[in-house]
Amino acid sequence: MFITTLLTGFIISSITVGFILLIKKLFQSQLSAKWQYNLWYLLLAALVIPFIPAHFLPAGNLFHSFTGPSSEGSTASINTAAPESGGTNTNWMQDFSVTVTQTNTDLFNGIAGGIWIAGALVFTGLSIHAWLKLKGIRKSISAVENKAILDLFKRAKQQLNISKNISLGVSDEVHSPLTFGLRKTFVVLPANFEEWLSEDDIRHIFLHELNHYKYKDIPTNYLMVFFQIIYWFNPLIWIAFKEMRLDREIACDYAVLLSLDDKNHKKYGNTIIHFIDKSSSPSYNKLANQLNGSKKQIKKRIVEIASFQADSKLLRAKSMGIFLLVGLFVITQIPFASVMANDNNRYTSFKPEQTNEEDLSSYFQNYEGSFVLYDMQEDAYHIYNEDQSTLRISPDSTYKIYSALFGLEENIITTEQSTIEWDGTEQPYDQWNQDQNLETALNRSVNWYFQQLDQKLGANSIQSYLSRIHYGNQDISDRTNPYWLESTLKISPVEQVELLQELYTNRFDFQEEHIQAVKEALQMDQKDGAALYGKTGTGNVNGKDINGWFVGFVETETNTYFFATNVQDEDNASGSIATEITLAILKDKQIYEE
């Protein structure tokens, strides 16, 4: 999940930086200095998006194609081990599985995470060093005692409507005026500045530094440093923040020029030039704002000062329009972040009116899992482990219920003729090495039968049906393996129960005889006026049973109960075990006794 967040951040930050740079280049003459700088605030907003908690992001499937196969590069092979009986009635319960070989990405994720942490620690250390350097400057500050200078500073504050107490001082550790400090703000001038700066120069410096304070550039510095630590691995962020700082200085220059009359514009430019000779290689601190910069930056600022013109109403309107355009672009990336954050693997629409949470941990023993039961008569859910019950995981062979239904709807098989001939390819189980009909294929969980249905259905039809019934994440993008077999298609236990109920009541208007045919094929047992219908599923990865399902429903004389049980383990979670747990719970609830 952490690596996914970093990847999402890299994509969103890169796209946003590229878009802003493109807009600045295309509309440079249509953007005022102030709004060129303001565009970068939209980048800061975009950098937050990947870290917004998933439940605050809008759910959706707008960028479905970005969620690639979860088992990319995996291959399917046969698990020839006999299925575990688990003590259940194997006359009607068949639990067959094949294994999927997947590359373990834990090592890669660990290395990538370690590299990011190492980089973040390095840049955190550099930031702390910058902070300590400012702390050292603060200790070296001497108060300005010249009354004329203090009066000049006071008038500059009044001109900008600044009432906060800001300390003015000098230090022999700075070579260029700078402003810093969150709780207590300092404007610091080089030592002996009166010897080589005129009164006009000093006034210009005060206006420049106080404008940085007025426009909240000091906290923005800290925010930029924070994001530079988080996104240290993205070179585009370094480029963007360098451009942002230059645009900020230009915007600050613009604000100063607005407060000066025309004859002082040239003098203001000369004030900035004065500091090039004093500090040809300025020591830059990212936590402070300072008047000086590199010669290249100073040159660009002087060009902008020389061509200064007050913004017209039309230019301001155009600038705001472009800003809103870029803002809209940033907003459109939120659904992408939502899909990446959720990986579309959490069912978020489950909000029943009546849900009873139950502690059934004694049935699950050492297994991670959940149990969902829907009582049709009470219109109530009974759930064990609600968090796990909304987590989407591979349906494995439980998906074959719907594959069969789609095949009937498309007339690939019919209620009268559902047999598909075995092509002679040797299969892992003797029961698979023969012709199969709908009932035997579901009962024996015959993979090749449903793979042939899929081939004849085609991806477009399958996708259409999955969208129609809202089946889990609806992702069938894996083309190397059966998408329902520990692959891209995923569904939660709650959704399994909801779909079974909707199948039972034919909410989606399938042909009634097809619903009935699938229902009859799912029947496992009947006794004492109660009928059990169900389908198991086992997810076997690299030879280990990691995912076990048992889903279905029980019809009694007075009610119908829909259930889904899922168990997960490192190497011993199968459909057989899920069935054992389910039957024990149903027995104790006096719903069904085998």
Image (tube, rainbow, N blue to C red):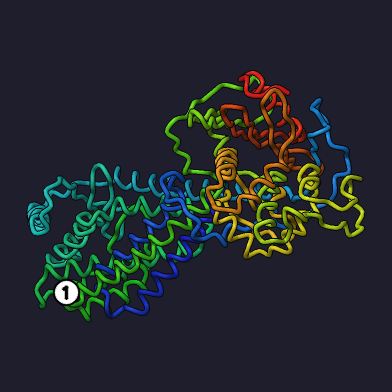
Q: Position of residue 174 (x, y in %)?
A: 31, 56
Tell me if 278 is positioned left or right of 52 in this view: left
Placement of 460 over or under 303, stated as above or below? above
Q: Position of residue 485 (x, y in %)?
A: 72, 49
Q: Position of residue 259 (x, y in %)?
A: 12, 67
Placement of 347 over or under 177, stated as above or below? above
In this view, the residue in front, 230 or 331, is 331
**Residue at x-position 92% and y-position 58%:** 424
Tell me if 472 is positioned left or right of 350 in this view: right
Q: Quadrant of residue 296?
A: bottom left
Q: Quadrant of residue 416?
A: bottom right
Q: Which residue is mark 1?
A: 267
**Residue at x-position 18% and y-position 77%:** 314
User: Label 1 amino acid?
Assistant: Lys
Q: From this viewpoint, is residue 365 visible? A: no
Q: Quadrant of the C terminus?
A: top right
Label 1 Cα crowd, 10 Å radius (few <14 / some 14-19 / many 20+): some
Q: Report helix, strand or loop for mark 1.
A: helix
Q: From this viewpoint, is residue 501 visible? A: yes
Tell me if 79 is positioned left or right of 167 in this view: right
Placement of 250 over or under 212, stated as above or below? below
In this view, the residue in front, 344 or 396, is 396
**Residue at x-position 63% and y-position 31%:** 555
